[in-house]
Amino acid sequence: MRKNKRTSLKGVKKLEHRMTRLLKPLGVRKCLLGEEFLALPSDAIINFPVVITEEVDTDFLDYCNSIEETFAPVGILSFLHEVGHIKTGDDFSMEEWSVYEDKVNKLTEKMRFLSYEERRPYLYKYFSIPQERAASTWAVKYANANPENIKRLCSKMEDAFKTFYKKNNIT
């Protein structure tokens, strides 16, 4: 089995390809494995992690449910949130994106060495940044309007990750 040059994990290219194929109908050009969820809206690229942090997940899901109650699992909402950045990216001016980057950098710096409990208030500030709120709102609205597609995405993504985890002995 070939290992990806960027990592010692097996099957990275296949996982990236499967995620790209699943999200392409939503306007995603490419999905790449990374350290965290991240979107590059102008390039329609999404980075996604191998593992999602449960603590942050709980807060993100709570935040999404504060927008509108949703049945979608947090993993799918995380992917859809990044798609939401692609879908809503043009709603913001270059100046607004510059302010966004400044806010994100400052919050990230403040949270760097804090425990999870100490970081929580900053997470909610992060979730409330206009671009983040717009992406989350898009994700929740899309999920709630497309329940059959969400069920299909859940099943296919779960299969893809299970295969990837099995190849890499990740439990």
Image (cartoon, helix red, strand yellow):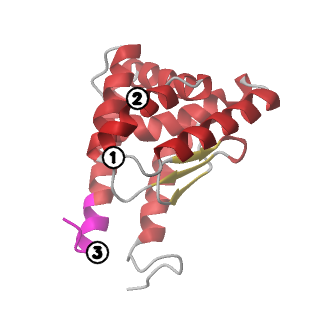
Residue at the spot of label 1: 115
Q: Residue furthest right?
A: 94
Report, in whole angstroms, how far the alpha carbon at label 2 lies from the one at label 3: 35 Å
Q: Which mark is residue 168?
A: 3
Residue 158 in magenta? no
The amino acid pointed to by label 2 is Pro
For label 1, count other residues whose C-alpha is less than 10 Å away and answer few (under 14), some (14-19) or many (20+).
few
**Residue occupying image coordinates x 47% and y 53%:** 36
Is residue 79 visible in the rendered image? The answer is yes
Say whether residue 22 is left or right of residue 101.
left
Q: Which residue bears the numbered disc 2? A: 121
Q: With respect to residue 50, does 103 lie above or below?
A: above
> Does label 2 or label 3 sit earlier along the sequence?
2
Q: In this view, does 56 lie to the left or right of 137?
A: left
Q: Point out the stretch of residues depicted in magenta.
A: 162-171
Per the model, the C-alpha gap separating discs 1 and 2 is: 11 Å
Q: Which of 61 and 11 is in front in this view?
A: 61
Write the residue at 81% across / 32% down.
94
